[in-house]
Image (cartoon, coloured by chain):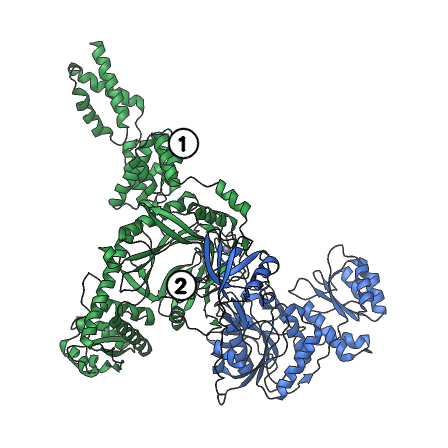
Amino acid sequence: MYDKLGLKVGLEVHRQLDTKRKLFCDCPTEPAEGQVIKITRYLREAQSELGEVDPAALFESKKRKKIIYHINPANVCLVEMDEEPPHDLNPEAVETALQIAALLKATPVDEIHVMRKIVIDGSNTSGFQRTCIVALGGELVVDGKKIPIQTVTLEEDAAKIVSTSRGVVEYDLSRLGIPLIEVATAPVISSPQEAARVAQAIGNVLRATRKVKRGIGTVRQDLNVSISGGAVTEIKGVQELELIPLVVELEVKRQLHLLQVAEELRKRLGGQALPPPQYVEVTNVFQNTKSSMVRKKLETGGKAYAVKLVRFAGLLSKESVKGIRLGAELAGHAKAWAEVEGILHTDELPAYGITAEEVSMLREAVGADEQDAVVVVVDEETKALEALRAVYERAAQAVEGVPGETRAARPDGLTVYMRPRPGSARMYPETDIPPLPITHEYMEKILSNLPETLDQTAERLAKTYSLSSQLVQALIDEEKEELFEQIVRATSLPATVVAAALTETMRNLRREGYPVQNLSDQLLAEIFHSLASGLFSKEALPDILGWMSKNPGASIEDAVKSLGLSHVSSKELEKEVEELVQRHAAEAGDPRLVNRLMGDLMKKYRGKVDGKLLHNILVEKIEAVKQRS
Amino acid sequence: MVSELGYGGFVAEVLSGLGVGLGDEVEVVRNGLRLRGFVMARYEYGAPDVLVLKLPNGYNIGVRIDASTQIRKLSSAVAPSFNPPPPAPPRENLPRVMIANTGGTIASRIDYRTGGVKPALTASDLVSIVPEIAEKANVSTEILMQVVSENMTPTHWTEIARKVDEFFRRGFDGVVITHGTDTMGYTAAALSFALQNPPAPVVLVGAQRSSDRPSSDAALNLLTAVEVAACAPFAEVVVAMHGWHGDDNVLIHRGTRVVKLHTSSRGAFQSINSSPLAVKTPQGLKLLTTSFHKRGENGYMFQPVFDERVMLVKFFPGMKPEALELLVERMGLRGVILEGTGLGHVASSFVPVLKSLREKGVFVGMTSQCRFGRVNMNVYENGRDLMRAGVIPLDNMLPETALVKLMWVLGKLGQKAAYEEVKNLMLTDICGEIGGRTGPQPLFTGEAEIV
Ligand SMILES: [Zn+2]
């Protein structure tokens, strides 16, 4: 089906490197507690010598915001604050990037040139992101298909947004400057599932370096998606691998929907373009409105403005898939360009306390008949007008088909409009950092010390620890293979127990809603050490893991105590089993006795005593009784 | 054509053989990779056999060129043609401000094609980059010189002062001087003495972060400088620079009291031993003192001559007195400003040399390397000995300002100046450079914890 639609997907996989220091300074890459200092900044883009106006830059400059940066001196220095020139490229990050390039069979550049890529939304204090191509032209084979790798890029991660409100945006600088590796594929992926598999395969290559960060926010996938007759949509920030197929599928459906709408519009307009807009003040229409939303805006000095969209009636709320409507697209543009909360349109009115009478007054005010749609924005005059301008422009594009856009992925797989697609990137050299030559000798050294790939790791783990291939695969998918080996080497615990706990048990707990992301590697290792030292039994492990995930900061002893798993000494246990068997001495010849007694014992000791141990003691005692009789 | 690109050796040979120049599109085949890109100028620190290419995606990369590399020209560069918009018609009732450029780049345009950063020097270009300027004043621009800050000399100070005097006579309501930041404090002090009690403000301004970056402090500093030049109630030589890390605080410092205290931070410039004259916040320009020379007040004196036979000498433990003796002799110095320790000391071994300098009529003034506070040579015996040897304590004058002032004093009094005249003038407050009360240090109010 996707072949016929001409689906083409390209991937950009971004992942934070787990280096000791940031890319251009000596700050640690770990989060830190502590008080923050706040500073206010504004960005203004230097104009291009060519006098060209880039659509994405225009978008940002139109909404020049006050930017407030949060600075924690524990992991932010003057470099991130754009108060000190960047230091040289972090060699640890460069080496990791070159390893990745080698694993992807990409050709390293002979000299790395750090560039400044203009980004003026505030996420980079300097107004640009420092980025450099490390290698070009590799490939990756996924399910027998060659996926060309276009570039391997090393860049500084951007600051994390803390909050945004009209005219003000706040960022935390802790993340700014963490090395980020970016691997970009050619747009050759032809199905939603394949996109996820390619992303995973790239992820596995990155992880082979053992130098990538794990956990929420450390991986971001950008997708560019197009179908024939549609346009390239750049979708930013898909965090979970599992979400990729849904995002692609929904983007295809969105483009198909927009193509359908465009066809209908062209029919209705008889091949004519959308007539030019007229923005009409309609505050009067709502002077006695019962809509509390509208009234609140008007009472605080807002005005209502409307624009007529000729022949659009019914098309704004037409919905082929839940959430995919032209109305939502218009609202997205209004929000992004003018920071208004939303729009009202006649396809969904009367509603929200707006009466049929108000709707007909509205139609009259803008001269709209039943075949037209009317969009209303209630806000400060300039904001309302700017929002309507964005609405009209987007509506005009709807007649043409699918506009190329940059969109942001939401957790439900749908996307929202972010900004227009940028023209050719506005980049210029970072002259504060000398170019870094990549010598033949250096590359030889990297090539001869390549890390084990995850496939090799899987093979080795299966062999060394006699694990099933499924269990090994699960460990790798859960990114727990390193932790697994570390625990098994340091304790006497059986490999299967550790592997199953780190995969199945964790997955079950997650499914049951336990916040297992709270269980850091270090904490998990401690829990297994406690298990190995007999603090609790392996049956109690799921309960312990669940409890610890819900009680961050608590100790394992706390967990044992609060779950009532206090330890039973083996002496006590033997005594108890001995007595039990004695009471049933007459039945010692019955082969079912073991199971029956085991059931009773487990009722009492589940979680406190290892079942296998208990079973052994029981069998031993019954045999002893048999011998004596 | 190739030389302008900075390449040499084999790369230069190949490029000139192909007739390739800056921005031309080429195809390079190397290591099995076929690359298309635009030829960029060689980076000064780059390896000599590496060609810099800008790929179609905007990235630059270095490609090693050797005999096995195939390279061919695809197309010639299209020269960018940017014409700044015509200047806005002057607005009535707005003050006239002259923006004079001495070097450094307060505003620039980027050629993303080549990575070149071009300074904006004309008024219309400047206004097209920082359009808010046009709301504050009708600006004119003039390029006085193109000198990086550290290459400035007293001769340049004189040249700048002469131009500013001319701008006053041409009736400008204020003058803004863009200046590299490294020695901006020295120039500010020099202009303070050269243009005493000026009829209009003279505002020096620069940028700590380059003007090509969207985060540059240049635009806000410039805008504030224009505003101060256009409408501040004071008419003095001042420096307008960020006061802190944020963009919500530009300080207006008196030219004789300001120093650069940080190599790279926006808030590098601070007033020492006195308050800044004013601070510009989003709420407006707030005066921080009432004692200043008012705009339109009389008393303008133009005296732009500096005698360069003066040195600023920083004392350090173990420094040999002969070094000072040698300097004065060899350089034919008429005066020395010492940057002594603490309250104003150099080693007692200097006493004989200082005595003989005094006898020869060489002026020796004492300032402190402590920066904050005033010298007082009465407190310790050594200080008293040094004074008896002829050293003149210069109260709370900044060492840099004292140096500039001594050059100016000697320039003003001329070759035949009497020692006492020099001394008296050095100790007289001419433009707020010496004396005044010393206030308490602001309290650190962080959440300090004693462990
Ligand atoms: Zn740092």
Q: Earlier in the sequence, mark 1 or mark 2?
A: 2
- Name the chain letter of the residue that bears numbered label 1: A
Q: Secondary structure at mark 1?
A: helix
Q: Which mark is residue B415?
A: none
Q: Whole-percent x and y of residue A109?
A: 49, 53
User: Seen in the image, is B180 located left or right of residue A451?
Assistant: right
Q: Colour of chain A?
A: green
Q: Residues within 10 Å of mark 1 (few under 14, many from 20)?
A: few
Q: Whole-percent x and y of residue B266?
A: 54, 66
Q: Whole-percent x and y of residue B23?
A: 51, 67
Q: Which residue occupies the extreme top position in the image?
A: A629
Q: Whole-percent x and y of residue B420?
A: 80, 75
Mark 1 CB near ligand 1 (8 Å cut): no
Q: Dividing the picture into quarters, in which one does residue B184 lie?
A: bottom right
Q: With respect to residue A292, does B316 lie above or below?
A: above
Residue named by callout 2: A170
Q: With respect to residue A537, does A62 lie above or below?
A: below
Q: Residues within 10 Å of mark 2 (few under 14, many from 20)?
A: many
Q: Which mark is residue A489?
A: 1
Q: Colour of chain B?
A: blue
Q: Secondary structure at mark 2?
A: strand
